[in-house]
Amino acid sequence: MKVLGLILAGEKGKGLGKLTSKRASAAVPIGGKYRAIDFTLSNMVRAGIKKVGVLTQYNPRSLMDHLGSGREWDLDRKRGGLYILQPYVSENDQYWYRGTADAMYQNITILRRGSEDYVLIGSGDHVFNFDFNALYDYHMTSMADITIMTKSIEGYDPKLYGVVKTNSEGKIVKFEEKHPNPEGDKINLGVYFVNKKMLMDLLYAAVPNGGYDFVSDIIISNLDMLRIMSYEFTGYWRNAKKSILEYKRINMDMLNQEISHELFYQNGKIFTKLKDLAPPKITSTGSVKNSIVADGSIISGNVVDSVIFRNVEIRSGAVVEDSIVLEGSVIEEGAKINNCILDKNVTIRSERVYKGYDEPLIFGKWQVM
Amino acid sequence: MTDVVAMILAGGQGTRLGVLTENIVKPAVPFGGKYRIIDFTLSNCTNSSIYTVGVLTQYKPRVLSKHLGIGRDWDLDRKQGGLSILSPYAASSKGEWYKGTAHAIHQNMDFIDQFSPKYVLVLSGDHVYAMDYNEMLDFHISKGSEATIACVRVPLSDASRFGTIITDNIYRIVDFEEKPSRPRSQLVSMGIYLFNWKILKKALIEDANDPNSAHDFGRNVIPRMLLEKRHMYAYEFDGYWRDVGTVYSFWVTNLELTHPMPALNLYDPNWRFYTHSEEMPPAFFGKKSKVINSLVSEGCIVYGDVEGSVLFQGVKVGEGSLVKNSVIMTNVDIGRNCHVENAVISENVIVKDGVSIGVGEEIENVERPDIYNHGISVIGERVLIASGAHIGKNCSVDNFLDMEKIGIKTLESGQNLRER
C-alpha cells in the first residue's frame, strides 16, 4: 500500500499543566521510556508506511530532539522518511497553523509531490497499538471516501471527545463534538484514512474559505455528501493530553500486564529513542513492588505501585508510592513521595515528604525540593 | 585519532567457556544484562575517538556479525573509516584460515594500508574493561616507542597464566615470556599492542615467511622484535580489566556488577558502553516479588524472588520461584516454584514449573572438571527443562536439548547432559 502518514503533533495540551509548559503534548513521557508520539509513529511504520510527516507547532524542541532523523523508527531513508513540518514564513503569508486542516493545507506540497494514493492521519497524543493494515482493508472493502477509527463510548467522558452515530452498515450519520448528551455511542479516535486526491480537494475547498479545522470543516460539513465510514477499534486506546488524571492513569495502566502485553508485544513493538543505558540495578536496601523500572536507574529505596523512568536514582530509605518519576530525577535518602509526578531531573532532598491528594502533585523540570 | 587503525581479534572460540561458546564465538557471549563481550572493546574505541576499526572473525561468526551490523550502535557507520568485518578469504593462489593472531593481521595488510595510518592498535575482543587508548598512545609517542604492550600488575602467583613482561626502570621491555613456570615479573600482557605501522608491517612479512613460526603475537612477533632491539615499552594500565575466559570468571565477573559500587561502572555518563539491543518495555516487578542486589533488564517480568543475580532482557521469573547468584540470559522463561542457584542459563531457555537447578551435593564434574567447577551449572541455549526436573551442581546441559523429548528429569551433580 502506498500511504503517506501525517501526525498532528502541534498542540500544547492545556490539560497537562506544568508537564507541557516546555514540550508539546506529543512529547510527554509515557510508560518508563516512551513518548506519546512513539505509539502512532511505530504503528504507522509497522504497517509499512515509509514516509511520515509530523506537523509541529507548540514548543517542538523536545519533540524534535526525540525524533531526530527518524532512525529509531527506520525512517532515516533515501526514499521517503521522516518530515518535520513546522509553520514557516514565506513571501506571501506568515501564519501559524490556524487549525488542523490549515496545518495540512500549508503543507500541501508534501501531498502534491509524493506518489502515495492514500493518507493516514493520526495524532501524536494517542496511546494504542494497532495494525493499520486492518483499517486499510476496511476502507477498501467498505468503499469509503473517508474512514474514521472509533471506539465504543463506554468508559470515556462524552464531554471530552467527538461522538459519532452510525447506521447499520457503519456509515457515520451524525458527528457531535464534545456534547454532554450525544446521540451516538462511539467516540472519534482521531485517526482518519482518506484518498489523497480527495483530501487535497477538500482542503482546497475549505481552508481558503476560512475552514481551518479538520473535524468541523472537512468531516462534519461533508457528512451528507461523502461516504464517511466508522471502523470500530476494540483494543486499548487513551489520549494522553486530556488531563493530569488521564496522564497518570495511562502510566499506571502499564503496570497491568494485560494492557502492557497488548501495547508492547501483541501486534509488534513500539520503538523509541535508544539511550544506551545499563540495566536497572536494585541494591541490597532496595525493594520494588508492582512497578516498572527503566534502564539506567539505581533503586536503593522502596518503590511501590510506581513508574520509574530512565536514569532515576532512588536512595536508601526513600519511599516512592503511587508516583511517576521521569528521567534523571533523584530522590534522596529518607524522602517520601506519594501520588506525585516528577518531571525530568527533579531532585527531592532527603527527609522531605510530599503527598498529592485529589490530583497528583507535579514537580517541574529541574526543580530541587 | 585519525592516524590510528584498531584491529580487534574476535575469532577465538574460548574453549574454557564450555557450552556457552559451542555455538557462538567468545566475543559474542552475552555479558552484564544487555551487552556482549566485544561491546566493551568497541565502546572503548568509540569513547577514545578511534573510528576506523577492523574486526577479525573466524570461529562461528553468525551471532557476532548480526550483532555488529554496520557498526551503527557504536557510531561506527561512517563515510570515512568505520567498522569492517574481516573474515578469512580465498585468494587466486590459495585461500586459508587465519593461522594465528599475527597471520590474521598479515592477511589484512591491504585493509590497513588503505588508511595509511601511523599507528595500528591490536585489540582482543575477549576482555571486559574500560580503557582510554589515547593515554596509551600518548605514552607510546612520548617514549618514542615502536611497539607498546599494555599490561596489568597481578600477584606473582597468578603471573604464570599470562605472558609476562620484564622491564627496566623506565618501562622499556627487556624480556617477554609466555606463561613461564617461574615468572620474573608481576606485569602481564593484556593482549593490547600499539605498533608503528611501518615496523609492524615489516615484522609481519618476516613472520609470514618463517616456516617455523606459529604466527602468534605473543610467541613469535614480539620475541622477534625484541631480538631486533626495537624500542619497546610496557604501558601499565591500572583500571578495570577482566579476562572472562572461564565459566567461573564469567560468572563471578557478571555477579560483581550487582555488588555495591562495582569496579566496572556501567552507569558512568562519560564512559558509556554501547550495544545492539532489542527494543523492550521497562522491567516489571510484581506485587509479591522480592528483588535485591540484582540487575534486572528491560523486558523482564518478575513475580518471584531474585537475589544477587543478573537478568538479561526479557527474562520471566514466575511466582514462588527463587533465582539466586545466577546469570540468566535473554528471553529465558522461568516458571513457577523453581529454585535456581549458582547457574548460568543461556538465551531462550524454557524452565518449566517446579524445576531446581544448582541444588544438591558438591561433586566434581566427571568429564570436564577444568570447565565446570565452583558448583556452577551451565545450561545451553534453547534448552527445554521439563517441569519438576532436577539439575545438580557442576552440571552442563548441551545447547538445543529438549529434556521433555528425551525423557530425562534428573541430572545429578557433576554430570553433563549431551545429545546422544
Image (tube, coloured by chain):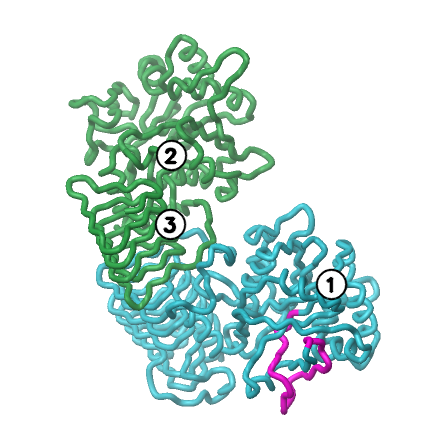
At 16% from the left edge and 23% from the top edge, which residue is drawn?
A181
Query: Taking A55 as reference, is A256 above or below it?
Result: below
Which residue does the numbered mark 1 point to in the structure image? B89
Q: Are marks 3 and 1 on the same chain?
A: no
Please say whether residue B19 is visible from this viewpoint: yes
Dot 1: element: loop
- Image quadrant in which you'd find residue B325: bottom left
Q: Amino acid at mark 3?
A: Gly
Dot 2: element: loop
Q: Magenta includes B193?
A: no
Figure colour of chain B: cyan
Which chain is rendered green in the image? A
User: How many neighbours does mark 3 have within 10 angstroms: few (below 14), some (14-19), or many (20 or more)?
Assistant: many
> Percent position (x, y) of residue A47?
45, 38
**Closer mark to the observer between disc 1 and disc 2:** 2
Which residue does the numbered mark 3 point to in the structure image? A328
> Which chain is home to disc 1?
B
Please say whether residue A264 is visible from this viewpoint: no
Q: CA distance from mark 3 to mark 1?
A: 48 Å
Q: Amino acid at mark 2?
A: Arg
Q: CA distance from mark 2 to mark 3?
A: 17 Å
Q: Magenta includes B181?
A: yes
Query: Taking A352 as reference, is A283 above or below it?
Result: below
Q: Is residue B32 left or right of residue B113?
A: left
Q: Residue furthest top?
A: A209
> Percent position (x, y) of residue B251?
45, 75
Which residue does the numbered mark 2 point to in the structure image? A23
Dot 3: element: loop
| Depth check, front residue: B311 or B318 | B311
Q: Which disc is residue A163 wearing?
A: none
The magenta region covers B170-192
